[in-house]
Amino acid sequence: MKRKLVSMTLAVMMGLSFTACGSGGDNKPATDGGNTATEDSASDNADDGAADDASNDDAANDGSSAEVANKDKPLVWFNRQPSNSSTGELDMAALSFNDSTYYVGFDANQGAELQGTMVKDYIEANIDKIDRNGDGVIGYVLAIGDIGHNDSIARTRGIRKALGTGVEKDGDINSDPVGTNTDGSAAAVQDGSIEVGGKKYVVRELASQEMKNSAGATWDAATAGNAIGTWSSSFGEEIDIIASNNDGMGMSMFNAWSKDNNVPTFGYDANSDAVAAIAEGYGGTISQHADVQAYLTLRVLRNALDGVDIDTGIGTADEAGNVLSDDVFVYNEEQRSYYALNVAVTSENYQDFTDSTKIYEPVSKQLDATKSPSKKVWLNIYNASDNFLSSTYQPLLQNYDDILNLEVDYIGGDGQTESNITNRLGNPGQYDAFAINMVKTDNAASYTALLNQ
Ligand code: BGC
């Protein structure tokens, strides 16, 4: 029953997102059967995991199997979409590296809008107690994840748009951090206003900062915990709301200050710890349907490896009965990208989201190993200590890899340097497919260069 409610909300939101994001999200997955048949290359996979000296014995067990060049193997980019970190322009060369290349992420604009609206709705519903010092100004601080990451940029814009604090820059809302802005003079934002019950309040972004540590890691939770310490000690009584580009940083601020001071913090990701914290005053979060994303990440590889229609088990049920309904994802063919849809998680529905690592029931059925034989996948996560990727996404991938008969090597990066990861892709020949989460969205070529060799 609750599920139904959530799906209905999703269906409504989806309608909105189609009109809002204008990215032409057509919901028809590609049906290119033109996959670079790798089906035979796995005949050698009986020796999975063993110190396989790679590639070159691929055809050895089976005279008929054609060896697949690394450049023709299935490749999925996930969570960080190949794009220019300054302009956001998609890197179509990386997204169409070969016929079996895709991106899996979520609809950043729809989610950002949802986060902004969630905060605005909360303010309106709690107007009698929100302005803690009664000065008529509703002050918020904002933790920014990575100024060059399109999801982070979208979320900053979503908050500023909903609260009326955004100013235009190059045809869009400026997403620059302001540093400290207690006097309302920063150029990158403006004071917004909100009227409830006939009374008008000013809304001010008191401070915002990219949470990057001294070694260069972005979305850094510890940095956010320090920032709220600094901000609260100089203008704590002015802070009425905390907004964060994700739950990792949000929870760090909640635990360091906001919980004890009854100031609601709003994050993004619906990590299990953040969802549980809603019972203790965390304001809310957004589920980006990581359960659907993790499935899609591995499923598109599986389909490409099996040489079947890419929509199998996605928009079209597979033989086991796995299928996703179109209220949980969209496929944009032009961008070769699958986007999961987001859902707001608040005090009203958080009980439905308490375990963020639970696989999505409609796609939980085991594939037949005679038709989808074991294959080896190289998969990296840009930063082994990213809260969302390590506590939500990777456990989900690990649940799905068995169901999909994929043997995945999980590589965790340091969040700072691409080479820390690419150095560990020295021998791509021993894998059948690749799933990549870059440190920086501009860096796709460092990976494709290795596959092209
Ligand atoms: C998530 C963040 C995460 C970031 C890393 C985003 O989609 O929401 O929590 O840190 O991806 O790339």
Image (tube, rainbow, N blue to C red):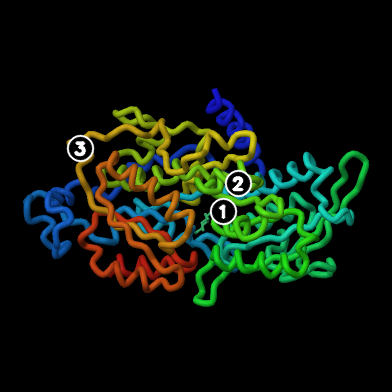
Question: Which label sits on residue 56?
Answer: none
Q: Left or right: where does residue 175 sit relative to residue 450?
A: right
Question: Which label sits on residue 285?
Answer: 2
For marks 2 and 1, the one nearer the N-term is: 1
Look at the numbered discs 1 and 3 and tell me whether their residues touch, using CB distance below 8 Å. no
C-alpha gap between disc 3 and disc 2: 38 Å
Question: Which label sits on residue 369?
Answer: 3
Q: Position of residue 435 (x, y in %)?
A: 36, 55
**Count of number-bearing discs:** 3
- Which quadrant holds the C terminus? bottom left
Vertical order, 366 against 115 (above or below)? above
What amino acid is found at the position of numbered circle 1 in the picture? Asp
Q: Is residue 235 visible?
A: yes
**Which residue is at a point 17% across and 49% down the rendered structure image?**
42
Vertical order, 371 against 255 (above or below)? above
User: For numbered disc 1, what is the local secondary structure?
Assistant: helix
Residue found at the very far right of the displayed protein: 198
What amino acid is found at the position of numbered circle 2 in the picture? Thr
Q: Which residue is mark 1?
A: 247
The mark closer to the camera, 3 or 2, is 2
User: For numbered disc 3, what is the local secondary structure?
Assistant: loop
